[in-house]
Amino acid sequence: MAADAGGLYLGFDFSTQQLKVVVMDGRLSVVYQDNVQFDTELPEFRTQGGVHIHADKLTVTSPVLMWVKALDLLLDKMKGAGFDFSRVSALSGSGQQHGSVYWMKGANETLRQLDPKKSLAQLLQGSFAVADSPVWMDSSSSQQCQDLQSTVGGAQRLADITGSRAYERFTGNQIAKIHQTRPDQYQDTERISLVSSFAASLFLGDYASIDYSDGSGMNLLDIGTRDWSKICLEATAPDLDRRLGPPRPSASVLGSVSSYFVSRYSFSEECRVVAFTGDNPASLAGMRLQEGDLAVSLGTSDTVFLWLKQPRPALEGHIFCNPVDWQSYMALLCFKNGSLTRERIRNECAGGLWEVFSAALGDTPLGNHGNIGFYYDSMEIMPCAVGVHCFDQDDNKVSGFSAQVEVRALVEGQFLAKRLHAEKLGYTILPGTRVLATGGASSNKAILQVLSDVFNTPVYTIDVANSACLGGAYRALHGLQAESGLSFCDVLRNAPEPQLAATPNPAAQEVYDRMLKRYARLEERVAHESRP
């Protein structure tokens, strides 16, 4: 189906703390945005940060009806603002990854016969076998993780199949826990959705398929065959393949919006629903990553997104099916110690001033005279370590550095870690490779210069607010045209280009290729010393 030049494209994001929407026109311009904050606008659900943290501190859930009611409220806001739903050609979106929804037996029949005179919350209040959904913050399924890895032949074998070792937040392990601890509710479940496919189901008026990309964050999908892994399903819960339904490519048009939305909000009957995906894959789409690119989001946590053709799953990091090219993959790396650690070093070594911090980076040489530092104010993910660890040029552990050396040691160390773990997952820096930088610290040119030098490639900045939402709108447009063979990049060729922010120093490659080998050895040492 061809795109309508006068059409609008909706991108929704069912995130942890709010439901957001971005509306884009056929010229790729954002023309409307809105949101619903769960804690303040839906206080009856008594969430904090959009979740319920249970007494054991490990179990974290969100009320499914809160998400349903938020959609009612958001669409009513748009209607009250005079938004013309009849112009919407397609919609898509995302949901927080790893959350799961358990539809009660008979819920699909309810979805197909929604009464447009009533709200979704009224109509669906009895449609969920589990009232509070486990979400990504939940870490109560450690035993189920151990059981899954033991069944399939170890953590690396599970990563080879599903793209990740077993994680407590991953949906398969949450399903196993519900089956084991609440068997009656599992038996009452007709369909299990991710938050993304649950949201798509609301618009479709039918159970929506889980897409390949979000499905690969479950410890259940074989990322090679792009189908459910038989051994993982059997290790998780009985009759699970039927409850999950067959997965679909992320660019799939699932159908037209249901008659409920046509009658209640005046959507066009021709409006298409494109498969929803997870918030991280949607962010990759929103940043318009291309083959070979790497995106670095510099925020409270630092996140790295990679576009890969031939991934090498490892015990850390995650490999997902690519949301905009079904034959490719994306990798996700998360580093806990990001901006807060940079701010601490700024305060201690640069008098609290970014100008002084940036000057220190400019006044110290590439490679920092061989000094290397690891700064883990919080327990890091890669490696599992905590504390500050400083080494001189001879790999001797030292108590610390001078202020200027410390600033560069922090920034170089953070980017060496990103390059090291990206290469472990199969990323290769090639001619034409781009690093796209986003997030708060991407406004600091001196930091971006170090990023460019460590990766020996140009760094571009991309100003993407609400990247997951925007990715949903982009994917809605792409979904309409994917069947005609147009690639995601083809569809978005007129989108604003990222801006060149830094190019590598000619000496950078020799310095950092050598330094990276030392960094890898020292990281292993730090990880070993941190083990209890």
Image (cartoon, helix red, strand yellow):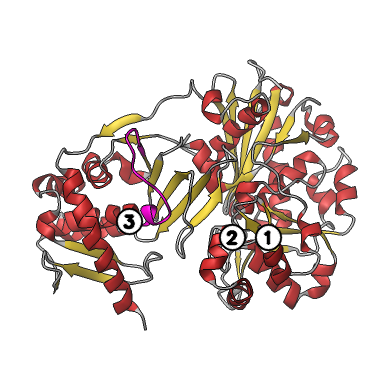
The residue type indicated by label 2 comes to: Ile
Q: Position of residue 207 (x, y in %)?
A: 80, 47
Read off the residue under disc 3: 420
Q: CA distance from mark 1 to mark 3?
A: 30 Å
**Of the residues tagged 3 and 2, which is closer to the observer?**
2
Q: Residue at x 44, y 46 (%)?
A: 306
Q: Earlier in the sequence, mark 2 or mark 1?
A: 2
The residue type indicated by label 1 comes to: Ser
The residue type indicated by label 3 comes to: Leu
Q: Position of residue 112 (x, y in %)?
A: 88, 43
In magenta segment, residue 430: yes
**Residue situated in front as seen by the camera: 432 or 380:** 432
Q: Secondary structure at mark 2?
A: helix
Does residue 409 appear left or right of residue 153 in this picture? left
Figure quadrant of the N terminus: top right
Residue 454 visible somewhere in the drawing: yes
Q: CA distance from mark 2 to mark 1?
A: 8 Å
Read off the residue under disc 1: 229
Mark 2 in CB contact with mark 1 (< 8 angstroms): yes
Quadrant position of residue 166? bottom right
Q: Secondary structure at mark 3?
A: helix
Read off the residue under disc 2: 161
Residue density around tag 2, few if under 14, some if 14–19, many if 20 or more, within 10 Å: many
**Residue situated in front as seen by the camera: 158 or 206:** 158
